Image (cartoon, rainbow, N blue to C red):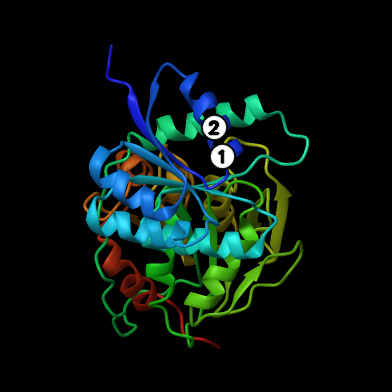
Amino acid sequence: MSNPIRVLVVDDSTTSRKALVQMLGDDPALRIVGEAADGVAAVRMAAALRPDVITMDVDMPGLDGLAATAAIMAQSPARVLMVCAVGEARQMDLSFRAIAAGALELISKPAAGEDLRRWGRRVAESVRLMAEVPVVRRRKLAAAAPAEGREVEVFGLVASTGGPPALVSVLSALPRSLGIPILVAQHMAEGFTPGLVRWFSQSLALPVEVAYDGAPLRPGRVYLPPDGHDLELDTDRLLRIRRASGVHCPSGNRLLHSLARACGALAGGVVLTGMGDDGAQGLLAIRNAGGLTFAQDEATSVVFGMPHAAVAAGAAATVLPLEEIAAAIVRHSAPRS
């Protein structure tokens, strides 16, 4: 039997902390090695205990979850899961800034009326999944190269675990004068999309929009689907929003398949860091249609699962480190008409 996953639970509420400790402790694959009631204690205990995974409350007095995560990642890097109230804008903003600082995942606090045991099982599953992720340090993104070479008219970007900071790294290096739209499918638990959009809007030169059904594509825009929906492009080049029904939300495969159908050789696709294989078949459809396809390399991926699946399927024509993806998008983007 493998060793249990060692977990540090951080929450300033004694009631919430004890409840989470009890629920996680019921999972035989997990072992609680410590409890911290504030960020200062969390930083100290992370260094002393070296847990495999830390569940981190966001809003705490003194050193909040963002500052504690930044300190932990600088001093004793660990896998951090942020536990956030999705209805509170400040907590959402702090959580996404913590993702930028190195946290891996966002977990919503239990909704009113939600069964706490069910919520605890959901958190335990996230802890088990994140325990498999290697702790990595991100590199600084290089500036985008001048546009040149073959041109496409739209790019689709797909990501999961580790995706939000990777997307910000790529998208923030794109110039406001970019001549094509960018469509994004970032796996995200329902309730977190507004926070992701706010973070993108604060970080990018390009305007960021939540797509609506039937909206026309506009150049130099970044489009994301609404909470709980998939994003697609139809053959009239109109955005289509569908309620997500698959395992992954939003679906990278559905997005990239739609770009292959709508744009053929004028479509481009990128599969970034993430668990599983979402995006591989959609990227293959773009490549088979004559479009451009890229995958993030293993060295710069938090999790190489999705890019590896794209490479194994023969879908990625080129494998690039994260810092070269923005340059590739710029280089192959059609000029604004």
Instruction: Report x, y in % for residue 226.
Output: 69, 57
Q: Check disc 2 and report the residue beneath it.
A: 18
User: Regarding mark 1 in the picture, which secondary structure is present there?
Assistant: helix
From the viewer's side, name the closer residue of 269 and 51: 51
Residue at image location 33% in from the left, 52% down from the top? 43
Q: Quadrant of the C terminus?
A: bottom right
Q: Which residue is mark 1?
A: 14
Q: Contact (CB < 8 A) between labels 1 and 2?
A: yes
Which of 71 and 41 lies nearest the eye of the viewer? 41
Per the model, the C-alpha gap separating discs 1 and 2 is 6 Å
Specify whether residue 168 is in view.
Answer: yes
Q: Amino acid at mark 1?
A: Thr
**Mark 2 belongs to which amino acid?**
Lys
Residue in the foreground of this view, choosing between 264 and 107: 107
Specify whether 22 is left or right of 132: right
- 206 is higher (above) or lower (below) than 290: below
Q: Is residue 8 above or below residue 77?
A: above
Q: Residue 276 in the image: x percent, y percent? A: 42, 37
Please name the residue shown 31% across and 79% down the image. Answer: 144
Q: Secondary structure beneath disc 2?
A: helix
- Where residue 116 sits, quadrant-wise, is top right
The x and y percentages for residue 160 are 46, 48
**Quadrant of the rendering where the N terminus is positioned:** top left
